[in-house]
Image (cartoon, helix red, strand yellow):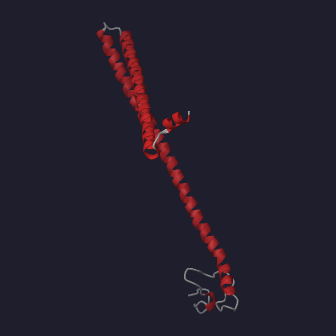
Amino acid sequence: MDLHSPSGVSPPEAQTRPGWSNAGNPAPDDDADGSPTSAFKAALANLGELKEYVSYFLAAKLDGVKVSFRNLAIYAVLGIIGLIAGGALVVTAIVLLCLGLSHALGALLHHTSWAGDLVVGLLLLGGIAAGVVFGMKALTGTSHKNTVKKYETRQRDQRINYGHDVHERAESQA
């Protein structure tokens, strides 16, 4: 139904395939006989509308991506703020624990608080150093074992697939 027409019915030349509209496009020539020329003219008439729909679709997708990145940035900032707040809370708890231990030790050492602070500080630094040394040894040892295992597996696969491995081939070439 054409709301702009006095009779309310669309003229036959304005009726096209479902989903396509000639609104705003000039009416095709009178040679609407199904020839390739008239089909080509009809396609060109709808090309502008198709371009607009594709442009609209792409703009909507781009805006959706922008909103996703904005939300990602917001959540990243909130996560960083939460991490800082949680870290500050843990540091505060550790400081209070250390102060309590040092004051208790100072009271045991004839009320010399500096001695308690010194002993607790040295014990904490020694514990941190030992943890770092043992942690690094375990980490590098595991990494080295995994690397050796990886290359042993590759050499075994080479012997299975080719009858020799890289070292055997190098020795035979020398």
Q: Residue at x 45, y 41 (%)?
A: 154
Q: How many marks?
A: 0
Where is residue 6 shown, x and y percent of the image? 61, 91
Residue at the far top in the pictured view? 110
Viewer-nearest residue: 16 or 23: 16
> Residue shown at 63%/71% (left/top)?
52
Would residue 76 appear left or right of 12 to someone viewing this image? left
Give above or below for 151 relative to 22: above
Please indicate, yes or no, whether residue 24 appears anywhere in the rendered image. no
Quarter that holds the C terminus: top right
* Residue nearest the observer in this picture, 31 or 160: 160
Q: Is residue 114 visible?
A: yes
Q: Horizontally, is 134 left or right of 171 in the view? A: left
Q: Quadrant of residue 88 in the image?
A: top left
State whether residue 98 is above or below residue 150.
above
| The N terminus, quarter of image | bottom right
- Who is closer to the viewer here, 73 or 107? 73
Outermost left residue:
108
Q: Camera-side residue: 2 or 154?
A: 154
**28 vs 54: above or below:** below
> Residue 2: percent from the left, percent from the top?
58, 87
Q: Is residue 135 left or right of residue 28?
A: left
Specify the quadrant of the image occupied by residue 38. Answer: bottom right
Residue at 52% x, 47% y: name it. Answer: 73
Q: Position of residue 15 (x, y in %)?
A: 59, 87
Counting from the top left corner in percent of width and height, residue 16 is at 59, 85
At x 32%, y 8%, the residue is: 111
